[in-house]
Image (tube, helix red, strand yellow):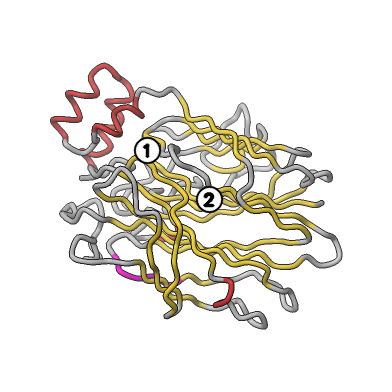
Amino acid sequence: MYRFRHALIAAALALPTATAASAQEGGFVTDHAKAFLLQEAIELKLEPTFEFKEAEHVINGVALRNRNAGTIHLRGVPQQRRVLRALLYWNFSDERDEGPRALPILFNGNNVRGEKVADNVDPCWGLVGNHSYRADVTRFIPRVDPNQDYLVVPIFNEATSTTGQNPWRNPEVQDRRLEGAWLVVIYSSAENPRGVAIYDDLSGTTSIGQDMAFFFAHPGIGPDSAGLFSLAGADGQRGGGNNTTSLANERTFFNGDQIAGPFDPDNAPFPLPLSASDWDGSDGWPLNQLSDTHTHEVELRNGASEVKYLVGNDCVTPVAFVIEGAL
């Protein structure tokens, strides 16, 4: 599947007029994906879904492809800080354009209800739709010692791929395939007040080889410029079951400065080297990949910032973004 999936994407990007015929022969890019192939880029202006004052954040994730459960290792909340909010996100693809409005999920043995936050086209696995969900799990995070391990069990049945197999070999026959789960924890600031903005209204943002540009409004955050930027993303990969890095070449730019991906001599900051791609599937190395969680130190603009992803020949789906900075 690896060879057909990505050879097809590369060919379609190079020759858009031949997309329909190629997709029919390969069978891995759906009619829904074909429309996206004709776009030059994805651009979206985002307002925060949640805003927190006098707060900071951490985010951790786990890859779930071909599994029925995974453990999120929450780390990074300082001692003596109060947890203000904990949000669980998860993502999967299936044969539906639109996912149900709500779905249950088990979080550390507790049955919680998740609300759908985004519908997208499937990122090139021959399915139809991709769906992101969010659940408030604040009450299940200990206030005294939140840095623990949390078991996540999304709903699954015989239609869900839980074989544990390499996603790029002996392709799955199930029509529901999990991607990942992410835990965003907001906790109280110390002496220097900071603010946090979360963005998860991301329908229509699956990239099938298109570059992506997101413009984040964050009024009041970032007057001293130093901040943090976090991504929860689905379908990132090194490619071929960790055998090659040919598909982990996405480059990330924040307010014009390259912060991740292969060296770009025209735009990269000094010193080098940069970190790896933001879409390299590192939540599930060496397998099962297809999930990413990354946080970067960035230079904010007062009121708004821009992140741009040069995607290359890959398919990826943003699930949530977080921006943190001084008030």
Q: Which residues are magenta?
A: 67-71
Query: In whole angstroms, how far apart are the C-alphas of marks 2 and 1?
Result: 19 Å
User: Outermost residue, bottom direction?
Assistant: 144
**Which x, y percent locates residue 324?**
70, 52
Q: Is residue 182 visible?
A: yes
Instruction: Return the residue nearer the eye: 87 or 308.
Output: 87
Q: Residue furthest top?
A: 17
Residue at which label 2 appears: 320
The outermost residue toward the right is 191
- Residue at position x 18%, y 52% from top? 171
Disc number placed over residue 314 in the picture, else none = 1
Q: Nearer the viewer, residue 284 or 85?
A: 85
Residue type of the residue flagged with mark 1: Asp
Residue 264 in picture, x, y percent from top left: 56, 32
Q: Could you tell me which secondary element the residue under label 1 belongs to?
A: loop
Q: Is residue 15 left or right of residue 222?
A: left
Picture residue at 64% right of the left edge, 53% below the top: 50
The residue closer to the viewer here, 19 or 265, is 19
Residue at 56 percent across and 39 percent down: it is: 252
| Amino acid at circle 2 | Ala
N-terminal of the two: label 2 or label 1? 1
Classify the position of the N terminus by image quarter.
Answer: top left
- Our reading of the magenta stretch's main secondary structure is loop
Other-residue count near label 2 (Cα within 10 Å), few / some / many at <14 / 14–19 / ≥20:
many
